């Protein structure tokens, strides 16, 4: 065989081996990490999410850091959470603040964690470490210790449920402080 032919064959084999080693090796590792849910599918900072139904705004969520995980069907809200709630007619009813939160992307339900303050436009304020907002029923609840302060009373207890405007609420296992008219 001529030397020129040998060089061509060796070059061809080298190129084939080099190309065979490229491409798909890193893909399974990245896929495994993504499937394990460690890497969000979408991520944003200083963002807003609007929940609406039939063209009416139900809630507006603001968060410093948002991570969306499609496979888990959840969105995590970090570094300060502020949510504004609206009535069926589009009137602002209440506001929620918390350290962080989680949205179930399938149901649109929201969980708030850490220093949760839920206040109605009528002046009632709920303080707790955990609050759950049900998107379909427009109700909030907590199974943790809560303090509810209104213009006329201060209630504390474990377990809580209310409409999102805080007009009607129930506190389970309650202790009471109230001003009584003479």
Image: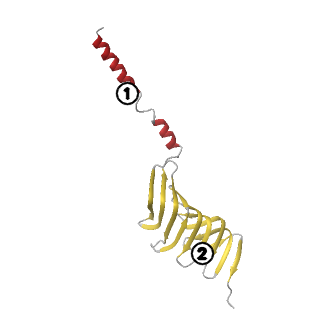
Residue pictured at 41% horizontal, 66% vertical: 55
Mark 2, Cα crowd under 10 Å, few <14 / some 14-19 / many 20+, is: few
Q: Secondary structure at mark 1?
A: helix
Percent coordinates x, y for residue 90 in the rendering: 44, 72
Mark carried by residue 172: none
Q: Quadrant of the N terminus?
A: top left
Disc 2 to disc 1, C-alpha distance: 69 Å
Q: Quadrant of the C terminus?
A: bottom right
Can you say whether 72 is above or below 16 in the image?
A: below
Residue pictured at 48% horizontal, 64% vertical: 61
Q: Which residue is mark 1?
A: 19
Percent coordinates x, y for residue 98 in the rendering: 56, 65
State if disc 1 and disc 2 touch (CB < 8 Å). no
Percent coordinates x, y for residue 9 in the rendering: 33, 16
Q: Along the line of sight, which residue is nearer the eye, 85 or 8?
A: 8
Residue pictured at 50% horizontal, 69% vertical: 85
Can you say whether 179 is above or below 173 in the image?
A: below
Mark carried by residue 168: 2
């Amino acid at each position: 065989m001529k030397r020129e032919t040998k060089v061509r064959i060796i070059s061809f084999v080298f190129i084939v081996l080099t190309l065979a080693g490229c491409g798909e090796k890193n893909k399974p590792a990245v896929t495994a990490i993504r499937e394990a849910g460690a890497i969000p599918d979408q991520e944003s900072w200083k963002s807003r999410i609007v929940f609406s139904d039939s063209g009416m705004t139900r809630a507006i969520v603001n968060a410093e850091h948002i991570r969306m995980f499609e496979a888990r069907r959840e969105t995590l809200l970090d570094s300060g959470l502020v949510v504004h709630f609206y009535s069926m007619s589009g009137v602002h009813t209440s506001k929620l603040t918390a350290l962080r939160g989680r949205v179930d992307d399938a149901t649109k339900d929201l969980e708030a964690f850490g220093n949760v303050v839920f206040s109605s436009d009528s002046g009632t304020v709920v303080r707790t470490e955990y609050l759950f907002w049900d998107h379909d029923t427009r109700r909030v609840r907590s199974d943790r210790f809560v303090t509810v302060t209104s213009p006329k009373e201060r209630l504390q207890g474990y377990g809580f449920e209310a409409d999102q405007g805080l007009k009607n609420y129930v506190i389970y296992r309650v202790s009471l402080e109230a001003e009584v008219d003479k």
